[in-house]
Amino acid sequence: MEKVPAILVAEDDDAVRAEVERALVSAEYSVSTVRSMAEALRALKSRSFDVIVTGTHLPDAGESGTLDAFGKASDAVMIVINESGTIKEVVKAIKMGALDYIVKPFSTDEFLLVIQRALDFRRLSQENIRLRRNINEFFNWPNIVGESDAMLRVFSVIDRVAATDSTIIITGESGTGKELVAKIIHYQSPRAERPLVKINCAALPEGLIESELFGHERGAFTGAMKQKKGRFELADGGTIFLDEVGDLSMSTQVKLLRVLQERCFERIGGSETIEVDVRVIAATNKDLQLEVDSGRFREDLFFRLNVIPITVPPLRERRGDIPLLIEYFLGKYEHKTSRSVRFSKEAVDVLLKYSYPGNVRELENIIERCATLSVSNVIKKEDLPRFLLDKSSQEPLLPLSELVSITERDYITRVLEHTNGSKVKAMDILGISRKSLWKKMKKYNIKL
């Protein structure tokens, strides 16, 4: 039997709440209504909802606001109902996680159409979550590895925006995996069967970047021996990934802005206007707001790109993911080298303390080097690259939560070694249940 969609209506205006409830009940949805944030949070704890219909200012929502509170408490799709709907208010609501925005008064047909769209979005998002779990199998490139709070927030945003056509800007240091995030967004989107076209804006000289982006006609300049389609044209129907977009010249920024605004352009030397249907994902390791303030990046282009920002954290801010990444890369290079190796506890401790200026890419290089050169099946501390053993990299200042996690992982490992792997004895020593021990072993990737 098909599950009836569950909808929570959180509205302090009695008349509006009753009107919305009548419309939803007439459409045979399962409806719960509340008039305050406290009531809403109790409802969310008692059951799950597919859609939340709410105003932007419930009286007891606190300083963080209604949408922020719902976003933290539930993964339901949010629909906003409000008295007014200026562009600024709509953009703010969408940035806070709302899928749609309805201005009062509204018709029942219009409202139910928005609800159906939200339920379709919810269904697709849940399918995308299942897809991501097996994404390596389907697309032959590595999944994003991580269970830290920082990475779970990234996963959450990916799941919510992949099915949309919103422009996305991915920021983060070099080596954090910005391109990988762009790939996952594309392959979880309705455009997955269309092209994903990439261009590194920093790798091409100014004289060539416009030709690469927009194409050129034969004879447009010296050396243009034939017509060439640009990356935007090649990406029609799919996604274009503009890597290092912060390195574009001001003149190219102007032309890119037009494409984002109008979805059309002309090839260099041509007069034909070419229209394209392209989803734009950009990435940069620069602070674009700082670039705008210094006059090196156009403010209007920044606003066009900064619709959905995703920040990929550096590895030093998610050290709890390092053991997972070590296991992942060891498995990857075991397949390539046809030999199984592992790191000793002392070697892992050193890897946990390093600051990784090159982020995940640097960690992978270290794992590959050790796995390839090791003469033993156990990589010991002394087998690591010498720079990792420098005293300056052994005692970084860590957030308290990360230090607690590292200490907990090490102690649980010691207890299990002491009990020769007996989980029953380890449970008695640690004073925790079997379920808690299993969850912690899974969290810290402890295998004995």
Image (cartoon, rainbow, N blue to C red):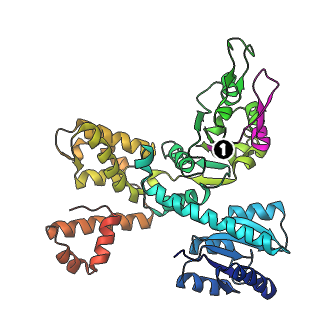
Q: Is residue 270 magenta?
A: yes
- Quarter in which the C terminus is drawn: bottom left
Rendered residue at 73%/19% (across/down): 217
**One can see residue 376 in this view:** yes
Residue labelled with disc 1: 280
Residue 84: % across, % down: 85, 70
Residue 102: give x, y in percent of width and height.
79, 69
Query: Would residue 204 appear left or right of 360 to someone viewing this image?
Result: right
Q: Residues within 10 Å of mark 1 (few under 14, many from 20)?
A: many
Q: Nearer the viewer, residue 353 or 414?
A: 414
Asked whether the viewer can see residue 61, the reply is no
Vertically, is 177 above or below 84?
above
Residue range (magenta): 257-282
Q: Position of residue 371 (x, y in %)?
A: 26, 40
Residue reaching furthest left?
420
Q: Residue at x 28, y 80 (%)?
A: 433
Q: Residue at x 75, y 42 (%)?
A: 260
Q: Nearer the viewer, residue 430 or 349?
A: 430
